[in-house]
Amino acid sequence: MKFPAAGAVPAEPSVRFMRKDPGVSLPRYETEGAAGMDLKARLEKDVVIPPGERVKIPTGLFPELPRGCEAQVRPRSGLALKSGITVLNAPGTIDADYRGEIEILLVNLGNEPFTVKNGDRIAQMVISPVCRFRIEEAETLEKTGRGGLGFGSTGV
């Protein structure tokens, strides 16, 4: 992958979304340098998430991602800090061949019930290219200095 020179503005590829309700907002970047687009709740009525509970919140958006891309659904840092609300399966992956509604699995890790209202920004979505690989079985693996050392092996 070739990256643009420092200060250069890269070309923006496009992605398509269908809305069955014209009142649903398309995702958008909130700042010039934002990596993620905000996703908003599409609700008929408020949803209360009690502490320790999880709910699936619809967005009213149906994606058509370019082949070779994925969308990752991530928490919004402000919701996590202020209220303990996060995306349970973060990052959630939306595959390029998925055409259903984007729904966000929110969990309340806070101490108070949290109310989600229609139009609330509940998550962010980052669209990125992905590589698919041919899988090969191996009898042995190349040796490295780390070997099989895992969790915590590189220190604090």
Image (tube, helix red, strand yellow):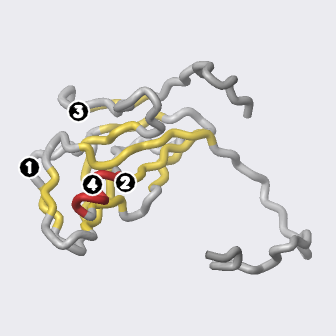
Q: Which SS class for mark 3?
A: loop
What is the distance, in whole Å, between disc 1 and disc 4 at their CAs?
20 Å
Marks 1 and 2, Cα distance to the nearest angstrom?
Answer: 22 Å
Q: Quadrant of the C terminus?
A: bottom right
Q: Is residue 95 above or below residue 81?
A: above
Please state if 36 lies on the left or on the right of 60 as rendered.
Answer: right
Secondary structure state at the residue bearing disc 2: loop
Query: Which residue in the structure is indicated by mark 4?
Result: 79
- Residue named by callout 1: 45
Q: Residue at x 70, y 74 (%)?
A: 154
Circle 1 or circle 2, nearest the eye: 2
Q: Nearer the viewer, residue 138 or 116?
A: 116
Q: Measured along the vertical axis of the image, is residue 111 above or below residue 44?
A: below
Quarter holding residue 150? bottom right
User: Mark 1 or mark 4, which has the lower sequence index?
Assistant: 1
Which residue occupies the extreme left position in the image? 45
Q: Amino acid at mark 4?
A: Leu
The disc placed on residue 32 is none
Q: Identify the residue position indicated by label 3 in the image.
A: 24
Q: Do the residues under discs 3 and 2 have CB atoms within 8 angstroms?
A: no
Local crowd at mark 1 within 10 Å, few (<14), some, or many (≥20)?
few
Nearer-N-terminus badge (3/4): 3
Residue 44 position in % (x across, y down): 11, 45
Cβ atoms at labels 1 and 4 below 8 Å apart:
no
Circles 2 and 4: CB atoms closer than 8 Å: yes
User: Mark 3 is on which residue type?
Assistant: Val
Which of disc 2 and disc 1 is earlier in sequence?
Answer: 1
Badge 2 is on which residue? 75
Mark 2 or mark 4, whichever is nearer to me: 4
Q: Secondary structure at mark 1?
A: loop
